[in-house]
């Protein structure tokens, strides 16, 4: 094969490979809106629910927002305590088959920046919840049909869009900073506007809030641990992940 024909051949093969990787039809999942196309885990095997793409972190973060990012891949030093995959949550029941922290590319990238900034101060993020499939929202709503605590499935939660996170900060020993209440404490003491906490708690909450806001996340008025990415809007999704 002549040299220029060989290069042409290689170019076409590369384009075809990229198209295959990015073609949403590779991820057959009738429940998804939009079609999920990614698990960024390099060690992930073929999945019937999601199509794995093996790419490095820089490439991953340049992908578009129809894709999903597994935060554990891009930030393995985050702490993951995905409570709805355990009974240690306010419902007292396991709501996910297995713990995963998925976000859209834009919100994942912003969260990574938050985490990296906190690491310069010897802190890290600890995740309680990230993307939550719409079907799980529905299950939560059936358990607790109260809009003060759970977004109604008819409306959908920012968690269903891959844009909301429930989280806190841990120190270099993995100890959670004192935020005044536990995660999923439903009462005024959890409100960001509550003024009766001591100066340590106020300062810890200020650190979390100011760092999250710096990278585009907005607060909830009733939960110090909940933040929503505001710079882009996304559709509600029901994409579900494969458990090994
Ligand atoms: Zn939340």
Image (cartoon, rainbow, N blue to C red):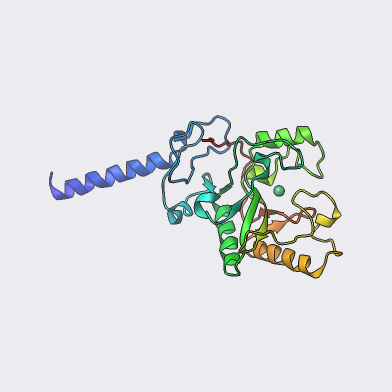
The image shows a total of numbered marks equal to 0
Where residue 5 appears, x then y in whole percent? Answer: 17, 46
Which quadrant does the N terminus fall into?
Answer: top left
In the figure, 93 relative to 42: above or below? above
Q: Furthest-front residue in view?
A: 173
**Residue 237 x/y as whole percent:** 61, 39
Residue 66 position in % (x across, y down): 53, 44
Residue pictured at 67% horizontal, 63% vertical: 213
Given residues 2 and 218, the one toward you in this image is 218
Q: Residue at x 56, y 63 (%)?
A: 116
Q: Is residue 96 above or below residue 194?
A: above
Q: Nearer the viewer, residue 158 or 74?
A: 74
Q: Quadrant of residue 136?
A: top right
Which of the two residues, 133 or 15, is positioned nearer the viewer here? 133
Q: Residue at x 33, y 44 (%)?
A: 15
Q: Nearer the viewer, residue 33 or 75?
A: 75
188 sits left or right of 64 in the view: right
Q: Is residue 6 left or right of residue 232?
A: left
Q: Position of residue 87 (x, y in %)?
A: 71, 39
């Amino acid at each position: 094969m002549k040299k220029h024909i060989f290069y042409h051949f290689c170019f076409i093969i590369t384009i075809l490979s990229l198209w295959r990787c990015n073609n949403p039809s590779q991820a057959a999942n009738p429940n998804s809106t939009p079609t999920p196309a990614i698990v960024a885990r390099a060690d992930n095997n073929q999945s019937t629910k999601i199509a794995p793409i093996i790419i490095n972190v820089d490439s991953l973060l340049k992908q578009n927002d129809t894709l999903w990012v597994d935060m554990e891949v891009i930030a393995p030093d985050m702490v993951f305590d995905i409570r709805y995959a355990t009974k240690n949550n306010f419902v007292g029941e396991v709501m996910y088959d297995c713990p995963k922290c998925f976000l859209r590319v834009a919100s994942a990238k912003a969260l990574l920046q938050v985490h990296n900034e906190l690491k310069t101060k010897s802190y890290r993020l600890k995740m309680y919840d990230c993307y939550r499939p719409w079907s799980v929202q529905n299950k939560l709503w059936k358990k607790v049909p109260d809009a003060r605590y759970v977004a109604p499935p008819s409306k959908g939660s920012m968690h269903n869009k891959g844009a909301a996170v429930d989280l806190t900060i841990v120190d270099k020993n993995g100890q959670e900073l004192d935020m005044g209440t536990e995660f999923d404490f439903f009462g005024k003491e959890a409100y960001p506007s509550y003024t009766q906490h001591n100066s340590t708690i106020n300062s810890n909450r200020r650190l979390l809030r100011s760092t999250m806001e710096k990278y585009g996340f907005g607060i909830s008025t009733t939960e110090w641990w909940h933040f929503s990415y505001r710079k882009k809007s996304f559709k509600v999704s029901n994409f579900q992940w494969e458990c090994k």
